Image: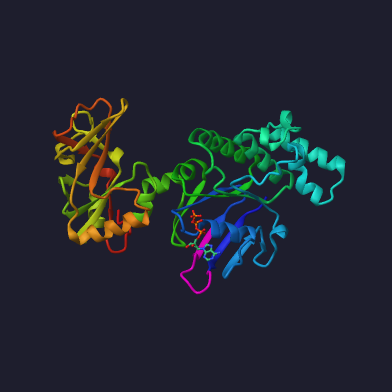
Amino acid sequence: MAAITIKNLVKKYGDGFPAVNDVSIDIADGEFVILVGPSGCGKSTLLRMIVGLEDITSGDLLIGEKRVNDLAPRERNLAMVFQNYALYPHLTVYENIAFPLRLAKMDNSEVDRLVRDASSTLELDEHLERKPGNLSGGQRQRVAMGRAIVRQADAFLFDEPLSNLDAKLRGQMRTEIARLQKRLGITTVYVTHDQTEAMTLGDRVAVLKRGILQQLATPRELYENPGNLFVAGFIGSPPMNFLPAEVSGNQVKLPFGTVELPADKAERAAGKGLLIAGIRPEHFEDASIANEGGSQSTFRAKVDVVEWLGNETYAYIPFEAPPEVAAQLQQLEKDLDGEAMRTQLVINLDGASRIREGDEAEIWVDARKIHLFDPSTGENLT
Ligand code: ATP
């Protein structure tokens, strides 16, 4: 096992915009780090540079203490687990796991010992004589990991390993990978575009956009303190709402009314003109249910659509962004692959809410959870 140090890595294909642009990440020995971002952000390129499948244009890559920029993939002692598992269909599970050891011309008794150790760790003992075609997706994934384990690689690298699976199996495999990684304590780098995987698997998550590292932090930190508009919009489901906002004194003026801010937040955003407020859907509540109420934190708005799901209620409130911030919000929507609607407020209320479509409803907002962003730089001021 080993730490991986990524120092100012750059990857340029031809003379275009760098696919990976000056990225630095220190991955501790045994740590699970996720690389996440929308399509084309450079996450696969970065992983392929680590494993040695892509040349490094500039910067340094260290495994343990050793600089490996110029080492061939097989000399780096890393184990890549691919999306399709890359298993040999004509070989048994046993021979699939043993494959890298046979290549290394290891003697039979040693091969047998390592394969049996790995299969017991992965609970594959009963399946050793089967072929991959007769295994479930989850079992195939474990065989692929078994092959990585027997090699006693310094780190596991995963490139979207679950993206071909259906939602249920994906959930099961996610838990399984998390459990195994903890048990084996092996340094792991995992690429995904799925924020649920990022949030649940990673000790830390690196969010990338157009080759540039936006934020490297624990999942909780990303959710609670996103560094900029992009990270704020990317992490969280349904996504954070973005609204035009103006701060004066301790008050913030939103399209639906004025809300009192905690003093420290108000101070950091004072005198900055028109800003973009970010508020997660779950930080609103039906004012008649919110027990933290207080008239300074509520506003009235006409509810357009209500979706009642039993335990929770979604309500939608249309608004129009003023031209001064409309362009930024549009760009943000593009950067986030258009996943979010920026022309309506989405709020997630308790299932007990009696709010109906067409109501002029009183809504409470948790002002402690409001983020305020500089519209020109996207930076979170609060
Ligand atoms: P996805 O989730 O779609 O796989 P990604 O975040 O993994 O995306 P990369 O595959 O790393 O992104 O690609 C980053 C950028 O580099 C993209 O703009 C892509 O078009 C470009 N790119 C990737 N591979 C090559 C290549 N071999 N030649 C030229 N450009 C490339």
Q: Check residue 24 for magenta coloring.
A: yes
Residue 64 position in % (x across, y down): 66, 57
Q: Residue at x 82, y 38 (%)?
A: 112
Report the label total. Answer: 0
Residue 129 position in % (x across, y down): 76, 32
Please state which of residues 250 and 97 is positioned toward the viewer in this rendering: 97
> Which quarter of the figure has residue 161?
top right
Q: Residue at x 20, y 34 (%)?
A: 293
Q: Check residue 240 for magenta coloring.
A: no
- Which stretch is magenta? 12-25
User: Is residue 273 visible to the viewer in this orientation of the structure?
Assistant: no
Q: Residue at the bottom extreme?
A: 15
Q: Residue at x 77, y 41 (%)?
A: 95
In the drawing, does residue 218 fall left or right of residue 95?
left
> Which quarter of the figure has residue 116?
top right
Residue 347 position in % (x across, y down): 26, 38
Residue 340 position in % (x across, y down): 32, 48
Please state which of residues 104 and 63 is positioned toward the viewer in this rendering: 104
In the drawing, does residue 256 fall left or right of residue 53?
left
Please state which of residues 101 and 135 is positioned toward the viewer in this rendering: 135
User: Is residue 149 visible to the viewer in this orientation of the structure?
Assistant: yes
